Amino acid sequence: MPKNFDSNPRLGEKSKDLRRNMTPEEKHLWYDYLKTYPIQFNRQRVIGDYIVDFYCRKANLVVEIDGAQHYVPDGISYDKERTCYFNGVGIDVIRFTNKDINDNFINVCAHIDMTVKRRLG
């Protein structure tokens, strides 16, 4: 993994703005679960040329929450490119929809917890 894979100064301000303006679903997952999760997660983290919703460095895990823009052809293609990049540097990606967060929050949290524990082995 490149030494500075997560330090892209060009995206620093954008990631700060995204932290200040999280979606309701991102806020829910952050404040009601990930912020106090026993293994540290960061929100709106720069990794390479991308900003991810949530990142756990210890587990090399990205958690993405996908709104409607992710389900159009350009969004699907872009997400595939991102996932290939992350997988190439040893980072696993799990995705949830806004609907998952709103309607199935307990199971989303359980899935994240199970994935972190599996990755830490």
Image (cartoon, rainbow, N blue to C red):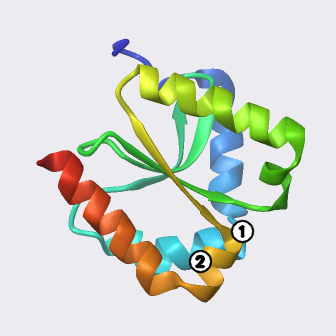
Give the x, y percent position of residue 59. Answer: 26, 45
In the displayed image of the protein, which residue is found farthest to the left? 121
Question: In the image shown, does 109 or 58 lie closer to the viewer?
Answer: 109
Q: Is residue 37 left or right of residue 107?
A: left
Task: Give the distance between the C-alpha atoms of the residues marked 1 and 2, in whole angstroms.
Answer: 11 Å
Which element carries disc 2, helix, strand or loop? helix
- Few, some or many residues within 10 Å of mark 2 (<14, 14–19, 20+): many
Give the x, y percent position of residue 13. Answer: 68, 38
- Residue at horizontal 81%, vertical 52%? 71
Residue 35, visible in the rendered structure: no
Is 60 above or below relative to 90?
A: below
- Residue at horizontal 23%, vertical 44%? 58
Badge 2 amino acid: Ile
Q: Which residue is mark 1?
A: 23
Q: Which residue is mark 2?
A: 101
Quarter in which the N terminus is drawn: top left
